[in-house]
Amino acid sequence: MPEQHLASVLAARPCGLLTDIDGTISPIAPTPEAAQVSPAAREYLRALARHLALVGVVSGRAAADAAALVGLPELVYVGNHGLEIWRGGSAQPMPEALPYVPLIARVLDEARAAINLPGVIVENKGVTGAVHYRLSTDPASAGPAIGALLRDLCARHGLKLTPGRMVWEIRPPLEADKGTAVRALAQQYGLRGLIFLGDDRTDADAFAVLRDLRRQGAALTLAIGVAADETPREVRELADVLVPGVAGAESVLAQAAALAAAQDATTRDQGPTR
């Protein structure tokens, strides 16, 4: 990772850093419950929160789950692919998403009854749902078969279906994703610099927004793709730089924390300008 590029974005104050969780600061786990955030990544995020205007998590997990898993109350948490935010100790879903909660639960029940494959996990996240097939006997064949079934269910009920790393995500038909969440946070905090770390297709939505903000001259941005064997094509194409796995993300966060601290120290030493 070119340190000068990272330093330039961090120096564009106010600056923010946002990250995905699973596959980015937490190794991909067999089940959602088994995931653990890297202790090093957690400490670097804590350090960054002392120096940047915004440090946060934008995840496909429910916002409450993301907040509990990362465990840093000073961070901002956006969950369910941009459909809810964690504020004041509770999740606040987009009002437009709430009418879809019973429908998503119904579709997940139908999917659970129809999918007769061991190891498949059906997860209800409130305003979204997910079907994980990583633990199935043959993920290569289970993925397309489950996708075909879910495509039919979602089409009949007017829901959106998106693929991920050995998971299918069921969402309301709303204009909300990680990209819209990132754009809203950039505007809310008036960011002139913005860094995003992610590893999956839904993170590519955020990468596209970072590229757009940079092209418009609204902010200096840096999209960091966290690469693995399963890294989707969209991530490789839209990332400004690729780093190897969670260890690579830890390295970026360590660099960012050190640079941000050094920049603030320099500003303090220089004192107020006249």
Image (cartoon, grey):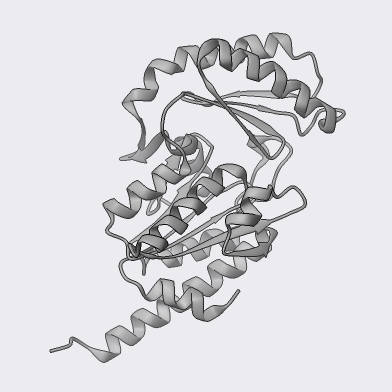
Does residue 256 appear left or right of residue 251 in this picture? Answer: left
Quadrant of residue 217 in the image?
bottom left
Q: Residue at x 40, y 34 (%)?
A: 84
In the depicted view, which residue is nearer to us: 36 or 172? Answer: 172
Q: Residue at x 53, y 38 (%)?
A: 60
Where does the image place residue 178, in percent across and percent down from the top left?
Answer: 47, 43
At x 35%, y 83%, the residue is 265
User: In the picture shown, does residue 258 fall above or below 177?
Assistant: below
Visible residue check, residue 71: no
Name the residue located 60 percent from the left edge and 74 percent from the top edge.
Answer: 1
Direction from residue 127 to residue 34 in the image, left or right: right
Q: In which quarter of the image is the C terminus?
A: bottom left
Residue 57 in the image: state x and y as whole percent: 47, 49
Q: 6 or 210, which lies in front?
A: 210
In the rendered view, tell whether residue 3 sits above or below residue 46: below
Q: How many marks?
A: 0
| Viewer-side residue, 11 vs 85 | 11
- Residue that protrudes farthest toward the left in the picture: 274
Residue 145 visible somewhere in the drawing: yes
Which residue is most to the right? Answer: 137
Q: Position of residue 199 (x, y in %)?
A: 62, 51
Q: Which residue is outermost to the front? A: 215
